[in-house]
Amino acid sequence: MFLGEDLLAWLVFALGAALFVGNGLAVVKPPPRPKAEGDLEKAPVVRSVTMALVGLVAAIWALASLIS
């Protein structure tokens, strides 16, 4: 197979981890000030936490697939 047998699991792990870390940091440490007129002052908490949890589930699932 192209680039190894576990390519899909590695890609899901990377995407899930990035989703978790990015949304988690958006909630914990918002930018100091809006850059443009339409930017939000802080991230929407419920949406960001939901997407972080989806990323966490995807990363754990992919990690379990890689280990087993």
Image (tube, helix red, strand yellow):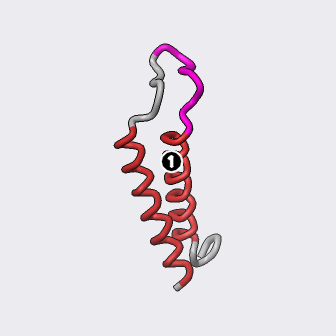
The answer to if 26 sits in the magenta stretch is no
Q: Quadrant of the N terminus?
A: bottom right
Question: Element under label 1?
Answer: helix
Which residue is at 52% across, 85% downward?
Answer: 68
Q: Residues within 10 Å of mark 1 (few under 14, many from 20)?
A: some
- Identity of the amino acid at label 1? Gly
Which residue is at 54% across, 65% downward?
Answer: 13
> Residue furthest toward the right?
3
Q: Which residues are magenta?
A: 29-37
**Residue closer to the observer: 9 or 23:** 23
Q: Is residue 28 above or below residue 15?
A: above
Q: Is residue 33 above or below residue 42?
A: above
Q: Position of residue 42 (x, y in %)?
A: 46, 30
Q: Position of residue 34 (x, y in %)?
A: 53, 21
Q: What secondary structure do most residues of the magenta stretch adopt?
A: loop
Q: Is residue 15 above or below residue 24?
A: below
Q: Position of residue 18 (x, y in %)?
A: 55, 53
Which residue is at 56% across, 21% downward?
Answer: 33
Q: Position of residue 55 (x, y in %)?
A: 46, 57
> Residue furthest toward the top?
37
Which residue is at 63% across, 75% downward?
Answer: 4
Left of 39 or right of it: where is 2? right
> Residue furthest toward the bottom?
68
**Residue closer to the observer: 29 or 50:** 29
**Residue closer to the observer: 59 or 25:** 25
Q: Which residue is mark 1?
A: 24
**Residue closer to the observer: 63 or 49:** 49
Q: Identify the image quadrant of residue 46.
A: top left
Question: For the image shown, how many numbered marks are present on the structure?
Answer: 1
Left of 36 or right of it: where is 44? left
